């Protein structure tokens, strides 16, 4: 499964995948909002987006990473913020290929680790993450303040 860093030419397909991702989490947004958000990420380079394509070149999934600093490690790290694979492409190694691309990118950037969150009922995702060596945090809770 070929995975490459997304560029502005990938925007249309990436926007379609991102819309499906937002629908999956029941937070649909207008296509124009999604396009503007992704365009800003790609143009500013404040995130790293990778896209997986099948043998025919059709986009099957994406992953998005944001850099941050892990203060407890005194080092840069990466937040694996978004991962999505089209329903028709699941169980074919797409997510694993995207996760591998994320790992390689983080290593190349000198990150000390990758952090991610997932829904408590995302058992397939949890199994994949644990298979890939991710360890569930049993010490810290995640909180969110909406502004």
Image (cartoon, grey):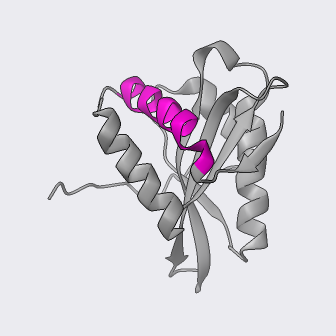
Q: Quadrant of the N terminus?
A: top right
User: Looking at the image, can residue 132 be seen?
Assistant: no
Q: Residue at x 67, y 30 (%)?
A: 59
Image position of 76 with respect to 99: above or below: below
Q: Nearer the viewer, residue 26 or 42?
A: 42
Over which residues does the magenta segment extend? 9-25
Q: Is residue 113 left or right of residue 121?
A: right
User: Looking at the image, can residue 142 be seen?
Assistant: yes
Q: Residue at x 28, y 34 (%)?
A: 29
Instruction: Point out the residue furthest to the left here.
Output: 147
Magenta segment, prevailing SS (helix, strand or loop): helix
Instruction: Point out the residue furthest to the front here.
Output: 9
Q: Quadrant of the C terminus?
A: bottom left
Residue 17 position within the rendered picture, expressed as x and y whole percent measured from the top left: 52, 31
Q: Residue at x 79, y 26 (%)?
A: 54
Q: Quadrant of residue 132?
A: top right
- 24 drawn magenta: yes
Instruction: Point out the residue furthest to the bottom here.
Output: 74
- 11 drawn magenta: yes
Q: Nearer the viewer, residue 34 or 140?
A: 34
Image position of 40 with respect to 126: above or below: below
Query: How many numbered circles are shown?
Result: 0
Image position of 16 with respect to 132: above or below: above
Q: Is residue 38 left or right of residue 129?
A: left
Q: Nearer the viewer, residue 146 or 57?
A: 57
Q: Quadrant of residue 128?
A: top right
Residue 134 position within the rendered picture, expressed as x and y whole percent measured from the top left: 68, 49
Q: Residue at x 59, y 16 (%)?
A: 87
Residue 76 position within the rendered picture, expressed as x and y whole percent measured from the top left: 60, 78
Q: Nearer the viewer, residue 66 or 59?
A: 59
């Amino acid at each position: 499964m070929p995975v490459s860093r997304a560029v502005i030419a990938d925007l249309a397909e990436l926007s379609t995948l991102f819309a499906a991702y937002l629908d999956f989490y029941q937070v649909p947004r207008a296509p124009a909002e999604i396009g503007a958000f992704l365009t800003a990420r790609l143009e500013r380079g404040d995130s790293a987006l990778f896209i997986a394509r099948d043998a025919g070149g059709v986009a099957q999934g994406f992953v998005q990473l944001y850099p941050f600093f892990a203060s407890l490690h005194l080092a840069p790290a990466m937040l694996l913020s978004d991962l999505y694979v089209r329903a028709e492409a699941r169980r074919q190694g797409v997510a694993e290929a995207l996760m591998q691309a994320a790992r390689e990118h983080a290593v190349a950037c000198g990150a000390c680790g990758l952090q991610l969150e997932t829904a408590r009922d995302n058992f397939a995702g949890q199994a994949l993450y644990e298979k890939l060596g991710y360890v569930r945090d049993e010490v810290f809770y995640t909180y969110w303040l909406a502004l």
